[in-house]
Amino acid sequence: MKKPKFRPRCLDCGEPYARSRWKISIMYCLPCGDLRAKDRKFTIAIPYNKGAYQVIYNAQDLATTNPKRTT
């Protein structure tokens, strides 16, 4: 008697998804992974001369941090 094949299940919705995604450590199905990717926000930290790094959340703020450069 054969063992049933392992089918990973999405951590958000519980639906089975492709083993190839599971093998590369993705724990979500395509629809749930797409929703998570859209919610993800990125921040960057830029160094200042003789100062600490400043965390920038808004892209417009990043455009105005260097007064010598115009956009």
Image (cartoon, grey):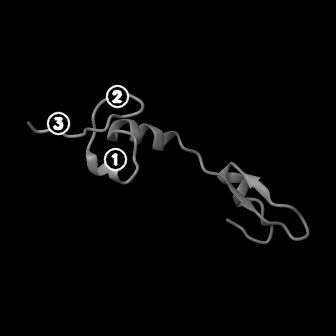
Q: Nearer the viewer, mark 3 or mark 2?
A: 3
**Residue at 17 percent of width and 36 percent of height:** 4
Crowdedness near tag 3: few (<14), some (14–19) or many (≥20) residues, C-alpha within 10 Å: few
- Residue 9 occupies which quadrant of the picture? top left
**Residue at 32 percent of width and 49 percent of height:** 21
Residue 59 in the image, given as x and y percentages of width and height = 65, 53
Horizontal side of residue 71 vs 66, given as left or right: left
Horizontal side of residue 47 vs 31, given as left or right: right
The disc at residue 14 is: 2
Mark 1 lies on a secondary structure that is: helix
Inter-mark Cα distance, 3 to 2: 18 Å
Quarter occupied by the C terminus: bottom right
Inter-mark Cα distance, 1 to 3: 17 Å
| Type of amino acid under label 1 | Trp
If you read the primary sequence from the N terminus, does the residue marked by circle 1 or circle 3 appear first?
A: 3
**Residue at 38 percent of width and 39 percent of height:** 28
41, above or below 69, in the image:
above
Quarter occupied by the N terminus: top left
Residue topped by disc 3? 4
Residue topped by disc 1? 22
Crowdedness near tag 1: few (<14), some (14–19) or many (≥20) residues, C-alpha within 10 Å: some
| Type of amino acid under label 2 | Gly
Farthest residue in the top direction? 13
Instruction: Compare residues 67 and 56 and report the one nearer the observer.
Output: 56
Instruction: Kindly check if marks 3 and 2 are in contact, taking CB atoms under 8 A apart as contact.
Output: no
Mark 2 lies on a secondary structure that is: loop
- Residue 6 occupies which quadrant of the picture? top left
